Amino acid sequence: MDVSQYLDLFIDETREHIQSLNDNILLLEQEPENMDTINEIFRAAHSLKGMSGTMGYVRMQKLTHDLENVFSEVRSGNMKVSSKLIDIMFRALDAIEAYLQTIVDTSTEGTEDNQDIIDDLNKVLKEGTAQDKEEETQEQATLTAAASSGTGGYEDIPIDEFLRGAIEDAKEDNMTVFGLTVTLDDNCMLKGARAFLVLRALEGVGELMKAVPDVDSIENEEFENSFSLLVVTDQPMEAVKGVVENVSEIKNVRIGQVTADAVKQAKKEEPKPAPAAVKEAPQAQETGSGNNAADNNASAKETETAKDASKDNKAGHKEGGKSQGTRSIRVDIEKLDNLMNMVSELVIAKNGLSTVVGRLKTGSRQINERIEYLENITTNLHEAVMKVRMVPIDSVVSRFPRMIRDLSRKLDKKMELVMTGEDTELDRTVIDELGDPLMHILRNSADHGIESAQVRAELGKPEVGTISLNAYQAGNNVIIEVSDDGGGVNVEKVKSKALSKGLITQEHADTMSDDEAVGLLFMPGFSTADKISDVSGRGVGLDVVKSKIESLGGTVECKSALHKGSTFIITLPLTLAIMQSLLVDIGGEKYAMPLSNIQTIEEIPVDMVKSINSSEVIELRGRVIPLFRLAEILECEKGEESEVLTVIVANKGEKLGAFVVDGLYEQQEIVIKSLGKYVDAGKLIIGATILGDGEVSLILDATVLI
Amino acid sequence: MKEKYIIVRTAGELYGIHISCVENIVKPQNITRMPLVPDYFKGLVNLRGEVLAVMSLRSRLALQGEDDCSKARIAVLKFEDQSRLGLLVDEVIGVSEVEGDEIEDISKDSEFIKGIGKTGTGIFAVLDIDRITDVSTQDAVSEG
């Protein structure tokens, strides 16, 4: 069967499972006894195994199978979690990730067997379980006993009061209740569909009373290879069995009559944990009754709940199912881009309409009201589409705890990563580009920031260094702060380094403020590390981070205090495609300026402009702000010099700049259009937009001048 | 094998643009001046909702005089990578079919001219669109 059409889905889901394993193994390292985590890990490993097997990636399947075996032992309590085990797990995980990468690149899994990891896994498995040999023998005994009395089939379906009542009712109506355990072929591709056919066939001859796992789970393929059902019918056993066997790709069907007496007997056994739940025995799978151990666990849980609330059958039912996350669907990003483009067109059309109406001398109040209404709708529509494109930064930062753990080992420093605000959302296009710069800053903090445990102890700091990543939304921006409690930036060292590299002059160095000196870190070709490690300092430095962030329309700053630590503050715009802007007149031309970084608009008399070092400044509320005459910078034709300057005060991070314009038009929502690849006016002009009257206007990011 | 060329006039001379490069011809309207770029970029226009950069052929070829606006047209060039560039000319004369071997190769003599072709009305210079649109060697204009 051709499975290539599932490849994208496989890649997506495998990524998710790998991430989930990464997260949970990290968690397991902290809390080795956490059963929820262990179950989650087992489930992810199990899914990985199944998926890679289905896709025909045998090497990947082999590795995940052995990984799953280890988790299985951990889950059943036969093995303890050790740091050695965690290390091997991570190695296996990296190998799986490598498989995935090969698959992404070439659609094949490559030829790497990773035999060493498999051997290590099996070794750990042997050692780990040998210690608990006695325990295991006991388990084995229970298991054998359980196997003889029925192995996780329909006999194990928990019967609550409600079901028992129903069974007795059926008997009175001369109906029979049959229990069925249906096992699908091992290589059945569409298990959910097959199972659905079985359910439908059964509905033709009788009524479904109970299913384990529940019907939703069955149809969603949330079972291993088999599922169990209770059916009430007036048909003989052979007829019921026949309709099920008519469905193709069924390996075998076990059927038996369920009576109220049998139920009573079963009820006595209930307090014991479901036998197969303790251990997923390979032989159980072969006998065709290998109910997924996870499901058995669930049914055991369900039994308890059902007893607690025996009257409320529904509650018991719910508990049995897996916890469901937010309902979501996968959408191709191209479709979203397309939708976004259409919304952009709509905004332009709306702007055009209001321009035309604005020109009408006899513009009636009614038309204006309708247009305002339209404006509301387009603004809301735009926001809604933007929200759809928003992705929590979690998808980028979730790999960092693992990275810091590995760095901690590699650098032989003790450190931990604390993250907050992972649910902060950013536009998808920004998220995709954010990973590398953030990783660089974190590596930088780990490598250059955090001191060795010894140094920290001497300084009276806690032995374990803390790196924190804090994300939050502020207005139209998202701020991401990465701070460490390490050594901070040694300003003198930075200055002398910059001097020796010829980046600044001695005079400049002497007059430089500490903040300015810290800013030198972002200059191209700067690296303060005394030795080049493979963690950071590979020639590319923070200047790359800076240009990347700036290409996303954001800014990056660094604050530092010697021996206390450093903080990198990244500010990013929420969205890139549409923004609120202020239309201004510069030398008779119309320019759009992003509203997000405009602080105030001031009227400044010409004689208030002072000159310092041959550059103009103004003093505003106690701050000295550099003044930029945009008309000159943009090579506009000279207009008349007026007595009072209209000045727009805008900020870049903490820095302010004052920009002289010749007049103000209105505030408008604009769609950012690319200038194409032929014209490049530098960073000052970030794009163009089409105004309501069809004219093209340039978008000016004056803050790059600061 | 016959090749088709769009024949245009700029600064009194005839030029031919191979028809495969030209997507459309539009009348120039409201060209927005673009600061901080080389002079031969005339500015930006709205081409059906997209922004199109427009280059003046006259300035690009370093010819004298002002662009003559009365009959001026923008030839919209479209390239393999889907990018577009407008080329502002004084007038579009029409389309000419020329046998491939009737184009005389003079590429060594001029930076932007590939050869000389003949039409019924006279001779025209075949523009080397690749070189004309290669602006990577443009004088870098630094910001600020």
Image (spheres, grey):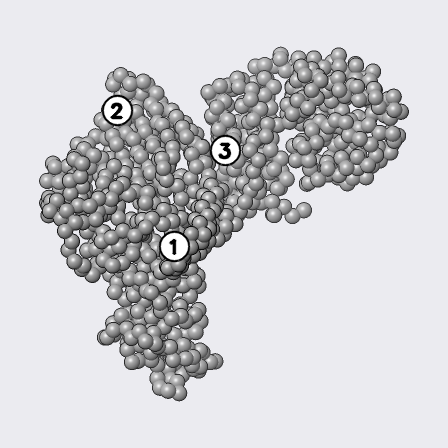
**How far apart are labels 1 and 3 at the CA level?**
36 Å
Which one is closest to the eye, mark 3 or mark 2? 2
In this rendering, the answer to whether A577 lies above or below A220 is below
First in sequence: mark 1 or mark 2? Answer: 2
**How far apart are labels 3 and 2 at the CA level?**
33 Å
Please tell me if label 1 and label 3 are on a single chain. Answer: yes
**What residue is shown with label 3?**
A19
Give the side of residue B49 with respect to residue A242, left or right: left
**What residue is shown with label 2?**
A564
Q: Quadrant of residue A290?
A: top right
Tell me the subunit letter for badge 3: A
Dot 3 falls on a residue whose secondary structure is helix
Q: Residues within 10 Å of mark 1 (few under 14, many from 20)?
A: many
Going by the numbered disc 1, the residue's amino acid type is Lys
First in sequence: mark 1 or mark 3? Answer: 3
| Quadrant where the C terminus of chain A is found in the figure | top left
Tell me the subunit letter for badge 2: A
Going by the numbered disc 3, the residue's amino acid type is Gln
In the depicted view, which residue is nearer to us: A132 or A338? A338
Name the residue at 35% across, 55% down. A688
Q: In x, y percent, where is residue A619?
A: 15, 40
Q: In x, y percent, where is residue A191?
A: 69, 37
**What residue is shown with label 1?**
A673
